[in-house]
Amino acid sequence: MLSRRHTLLNRLLRAYKLLLASLLLLIWIGGLVYFFQWERGEMRQSSLAMVNVVATQSSAALMFGDVLVLRENLAAIKDLEGLRWAAIVPIAPDFPLTVVRYLDVPDDPWRLIERMGVDQVQVGFREMLIRAPITHRGQVRGHVLILVDLSQEIQGFIQLALALLFLLGIGFFLGLALFTRIVRSIVAPLNDLIGVATGVANQARAESALENLPRPVADFGDEVGKMAEAFNLMLDSLIRRDEQMRAQSLRLEQLVEDLRSLSARMRAVREEERTRISHEIHDELGQRLTSLKYEVARVIPGDVGRPIAGQIDELVRVVRVISWELRPSVLDSLGLVAAIEWQAQDFARRMNVRCSVDLPEGELDLPSEMATDLFRIFQELLTNISRHARARRVDAILEVTDSAVHLEVKDDGRGMDVRDQARPSLGLLGMRERLERWGGIIDIGPASTDGEASGTRIAIVIPLAHAKPVETQEPTQ
């Protein structure tokens, strides 16, 4: 009985054997039956024809009672194959003749005639009884009766059946060998696929450290079952690996959020520290230096103390520059618009570059943290222009709409290549970090619109969604 534990090759071979054996057996039995019936029919027809000839020739001899002629007529069929006996049986009561016999005729042939009835031929398994009427002027006067032995015919038929069975057996084994070769060629790629799938599954199992993967419930032994098991292992490995990757992705996203929160916190702390240090330098150190100048002028009057006072004035100027670079007091006192205007004038003076700004009238109602980030982004843009652009003109536009804050800075320098944008830059990274906090975006492209890549245009948009920074989680401990 076939089961799923048999290989596909074995099941195909068994099915082929059963089918071919049944087909050959059917052909053998059908051929034998047909041949046996055909051979018997041929023998019956030839024997019946010969008996009819004898009956025709014996009509006159029977009427005249010529026994010698009747015996000669019977002797004429002695060469009939398988003839066991022959007889001429008169049935007219006025005939003085009895049965004319040839060979071993039964004592009561009339009984055989009555048993045959109207049939001219009665066939048994090993013998065949044939009858032909002898007629005279339309009346039946007697019968020619012969018995043919079929033993030799059956023996020859058995020999033929055995020979045919031998030939069919040879054909069966030759067909089996050919079919086995064909099935092996078909199953071979399937076995290769099973091997590859199993190897991939084992590799994924080892790489994912999944020693306790659930096995398939059905443990089949054929090729299809093995391949299903291999694919189940692969699927389990992929599912587990996908789960691990999702967990790693979640941990990575959490880590990124923590880093963003930490970065935002560090920037806020840095701005606070800069503001504190700037105020201390401007107020404390500036006042002390001013007091020192007046003291020097009092102690050393005239031309002798004038150089010392000049050095003190230069030192006060340096202290003010350092204080402004740490945290421009104009940003805290006058707001973002004034700070950007002051920064643009200072940049134009220091770099000898024409710098024009288009700013809104009046002060903007923006959160202090957003104003600080916008100012620092504007500072970073001017710093990049001074370092890389080689520009002669810079234009800046600050605009506030109902939905967003727009800051655009253009220069006529050498432009920024795409590779420069893809290259890691702390300045661009810092600007993007500040913008991501507020959900803003930055767009970098050429400044000219005439098709020539000249200068750089940087556009920044920060949506005013309640003017609040994007919520970030506190860094995990």
Image (cartoon, rainbow, N blue to C red):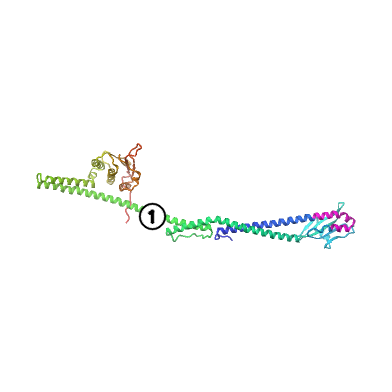
Residue 280 % position (x, y):
20, 49
Q: In terms of depth relative to the viewer, which is nearer, 60 or 188?
A: 188
Q: Is residue 333 left or right of residue 5?
A: left
Residue 231 % position (x, y):
48, 56
Residue 322, above or below 452:
below
Magenta segment, prevailing SS (helix, strand or loop)? helix
Q: Which residues are magenta?
A: 48-74
For the point 21% across and 48% down, the residue is: 279
The kind of secondary structure element at disc 1 is: helix
Residue 364 % position (x, y):
27, 41
Residue 334 location, quadrant: top left
How many numbered marks does the figure carry?
A: 1
Q: Give the position of the N terminus as an image quadrant.
A: bottom right
Residue 177 % position (x, y):
60, 58
Residue 119, above or below 348:
below
Residue 374 location, quadrant: top left
Confirm whether the magenta stretch covers residue 67: yes
For the point 51% across and 56% down, the residue is: 192
Confirm whether the magenta stretch covers residue 386: no
Residue 75 in sight in this render: yes
Q: Give the position of the C terminus as an image quadrant.
A: bottom left
- Which residue ends up furthest to the top in the rendered image? 450
Residue located beneath label 1 in the image:
248
Identify residue type, mark 1. Gln
For the point 16% across and 47% down, the residue is: 287
Q: Is residue 250 left or right of residue 121?
A: left
